[in-house]
Amino acid sequence: VSGRRRAGGAAPAPVRVRAAAAADGPAARGLLRENDELHAALAPGYFRAAGRDESEGAWRRLLDEPNGAVLVAATGAGGAVVGLVIVRVYDTPPDPTMVPRRRAHVDTLVVAAAERRRGVGRRLMDEAGVWARARGAEELVLTTWAGNEAAEAFYRRLGYAPRSTAWTRALP
Ligand SMILES: CC(C)(COP(=O)(O)OP(=O)(O)OC[C@H]1O[C@@H](n2cnc3c(N)ncnc32)[C@H](O)[C@@H]1OP(=O)(O)O)[C@@H](O)C(=O)NCCC(=O)NCCS
């Protein structure tokens, strides 16, 4: 499937989105590290840049999750992995005050810094939506951290809108 390159008239960049495989572990680790560093910078009280279990076992467990998918975007002749999305389906808990609904949560989305603004993120979100739809989800949900203006602009551009806001204050 083809993505689209941005600059006026430039040739489209072939972007293939597929289910991640065990062999994608090293590339995925680099992308997840980029994402962890960003979140540690945005919310240092919540996230650690170097805390992730980078073992092969952890990667395999992620790939084997029954209610989730890891999709990767590969570009170029060599199929280099330049982006990753982790999506999981959740059902509303059985609470009579809540509308029963199956939703999919995008828990992680990251595109390599050098590959941004070329349509890779959009392709990953499109395919996450296809995966979620096929599993009965009616909606995609995700969280952004305050200060992540690129992500906010990106999701707005894709048609997402805020549904709730988390407010915090440090206690004296
Ligand atoms: C957010 C992110 C995934 C976007 O990926 P991407 O491949 O650059 O996005 P796309 O090229 O598909 O962008 C689609 C559209 O979104 C908008 N957009 C994307 N990045 C933007 C930015 N930095 N500023 C303003 N608009 C932006 C644009 O309208 C863009 O279309 P255009 O390039 O034709 O103008 C990427 O910036 C990223 O990995 N950021 C770090 C991790 C992160 O914040 N993840 C999401 C929050 S958890």
Image (cartoon, helix red, strand yellow):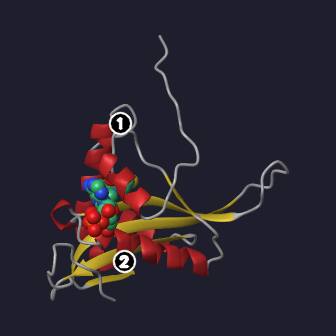
- The amino acid pointed to by label 1 is Ala
* Residue drawn at 51 percent across, 54 percent down: 161
* Residue drawn at 35 percent across, 80 percent down: 21
In this rendering, does residue 106 appear at all? Answer: yes
Quarter of the image where ligand 1 sits: bottom left
* Residue drawn at 27 percent across, 44 percent down: 49
Q: Secondary structure at mark 1?
A: loop
In this rendering, does residue 28 appear at all? Answer: no
Q: CA distance from mark 1 to mark 2?
A: 28 Å
Task: Name the residue tied to disc 1.
Answer: 43
Q: Secondary structure at mark 2?
A: loop
Mark earlier in primary sequence (1, 2): 2
Whole-percent x, y for residue 40 in the image: 30, 40
Query: In the figure, 152 relative to 89: above or below?
Result: above
Quadrant of res 89: bottom right
Task: Name the residue tied to disc 2.
Answer: 20
* Closer-to-camera residue (11/135): 11
Q: For this view, does 2 lie left or right of residue 6?
A: right
- The amino acid pointed to by label 2 is Ala
* Closer-to-camera residue (11/46): 11
* Residue drawn at 44 percent across, 75 percent down: 126
Q: For this view, does 11 lie left or right of residue 66?
A: left
> Which residue of the protein is positioned furthest toward the right in this rendering?
96
Whole-percent x, y for residue 34 in the image: 24, 54
Number of residue marks: 2
Quadrant of res 140: bottom right
CB of mark 2 near ligand 1 (< 8 Å):
no
Query: In the figure, 78 relative to 54: above or below?
Result: below
Query: In the figure, 9 relative to 163: above or below?
Result: below
